[in-house]
Amino acid sequence: MASGADESQASEHFTAVDYALFSLMLAVSVGIGVWTAYRSRGRESTQEYLLGSGAMTPFPVALSLLGGIISAISILGNPTEVYLHGSQLGVTLLGVILGSIVTHQLTLPLFYDLRLVSISQYLELRFRSRAVRLLGTMCQLIVMFIYMGVCLYAPSLALSTVTGLSVLGSIVLMGLVCTFYISVGGVKAVVYTDVMQTLLMFGGVLLVVIICCQEIGLGRVWTIADQGARIEFFNMNTSPFVRHTFWSTTVLGFFFTLEVNGINQPSYQRFASIGNLATAQRLVISFTVGVWLLWGLFYFSGLVAYAAFRDCDPLASGRIQKPDQVIPYLVMQKLGHLTGVPGVFVAAVYGGVLSSLSSNGNSMACLLWEDFLKDIPYFSRMSDAAATRVLKLISVVMGVSGICVGVLAGNLGNIFHVITSISGAVKGPILGVFLAGMSTPWVNTKGAVLGFLVAFCYNVWVVVGKFLRGGGHPAHLPLSVDGCPENLLQPVNASTIAFVSNITTATLSTNLTTDLTADFTTMAPDATRGEGRTVYDVSYCYFGITGILMTLIISNLISFCTVSSGSTDKLDGSTPTSTSSGRRWYLLSVVGIRQFQVVVHQQSGLVALVGMSGDAAQIGMAVLVG
């Protein structure tokens, strides 16, 4: 924890101008929510509240899509990962391209043309099982609950670093502001506030990086980082036990994009708010470019922070409590004398959290309504206006729940590592169910459910075991305290290096030393040795893709073992009507390509892919070709 002098200094630097800038951002966010609700008066509906009536303009939606995903976790967590473990994590950007291709060509066209509201509806249509649909919804809700809490905690930690404001008070303030504007304004309020908040995120961090580079020197930042073993992009080690390699970070980037953009409720609601598929697909391209710009900037800010603290690391010297306080501490110590800069940075961080929090809160309300409440007789008899009021109430409940989770999030480790591990463990298996439905039309309900359960149990077992064994605080590259003022007052060895995994005390001894043979790699604790490796030591980058692959493999095996010979599914009732002017789709499988049309049953609304010969088939992987 920072010393009393440090806290006092931080509070003095956070001036009235800084508070005004920060307060202005909050006021604008609330104002947008009120303005959106005012403009929508008299024509409120669930479609308007959740999807913006499918008639929003592309530019704000593109920024909202980016801002809803690039959160305060990215602003604080990504630089911290580079600061402690090196730049190998930057290779995730290559995986983002691969994930965007799958989203552009596969998942988005399929979801969009089915005209879903909740993407979990696809699971019910594909597997003809409401239980599978609810399973998908529960997994999404669990991850979004945790994500909301961590998103609240991260900027609250930042604000406590630069102002001395309590973390609890900050969490409550931010949660209430966000809850208010998403509940009154719906998805339109979320999108329009995201525009301001996304631009603020980029501008705030860019301002900090530019000013620091002017003081240190752009070339010197790179040189210092290289000397400290922070520059690494092509670690081609194929061992799964190495924390960050070219392969593991590429896989992480692919899974991240698939999770947050390809098969993700908040992102789908943005896509569905656009009038046509071609424009929605262009948003995928703009998202990829935006992630490269923002994440590239955030990664580089981690190198800037390392260059600034190369001789006096604030974590090792006890000036900060948590690794994720490094960037806020950099702002106050190096830029605190510049009036307004701390305020802009804090506003940028809070812009990130408001963007992500609002996106998830609105989507959670959507999932609860569409997948749990809508079909209950009491709610199904409601008018559209009454249903919209229920959605607003649900949004309030989700916001308050997020505040509660945020209070608990401070007990976790590095926020990037934590949220990536948890989301990979939970979302990986359910993404596997979605992909099994899209790519393997022979997979049945039994196979999908058993595949999910096995993969989910395995992932949770590994993640929990990893954290219980200390994996939540992995060993990092060496940090130096040689240049700290307290060490300069007494003779010390020039090679004194602080090697700290987790700082929990207020101060450390000034003569802190470590073994000079410490390895300068980004490997997990046991990865540098040839013994003691277990599944708990596998890199967290593989959690998500492991869940997907296990689900795909097991679901296929179970389906082949349980399929009934000669069984076929038939559409009964009135003659189906071809949608989308008879556009033809192709079902791809390992046995060849067969021509199908998208049809909808007139009475039940059931969507299926029907062969041109009249034979019915289950929904499989559909790719539009004409």
Image (cartoon, rainbow, N blue to C red):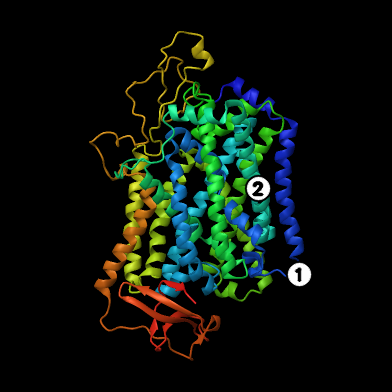
Q: Circle 1 — which element?
A: loop
The residue positioned 51% from the left and 35% from the top of the image is: 302
Q: Which image quarter: residue 46? A: bottom right
Which residue is farthest left? Answer: 531
Q: Position of residue 564 (x, y in %)?
A: 27, 79
The residue at which mark 1 appears reads as 42
Q: Amino acid at mark 2?
A: Leu
Q: Amino acid at mark 1?
A: Gly
Please tell me whether residue 79 is drawn above or below residue 357 in the rendered image: above
Is 410 drawn above or below residue 196 in the view shown? above
* Closer to the camera in the image, 89 or 562: 89
Tell me which label, 1 or 2, sits earlier in the chain: 1
Q: Quadrant of residue 428?
A: bottom left
Q: Which mark is residue 199?
A: 2
- x, y (%) of residue 578? 51, 85
**Mark 1 closeness class: few <14, some 14–19, many ≥20 residues within 10 Å:** few
Mark 1 to mark 2: distance in Å?
Answer: 32 Å
Q: Nearer the viewer, residue 593 or 357?
A: 593
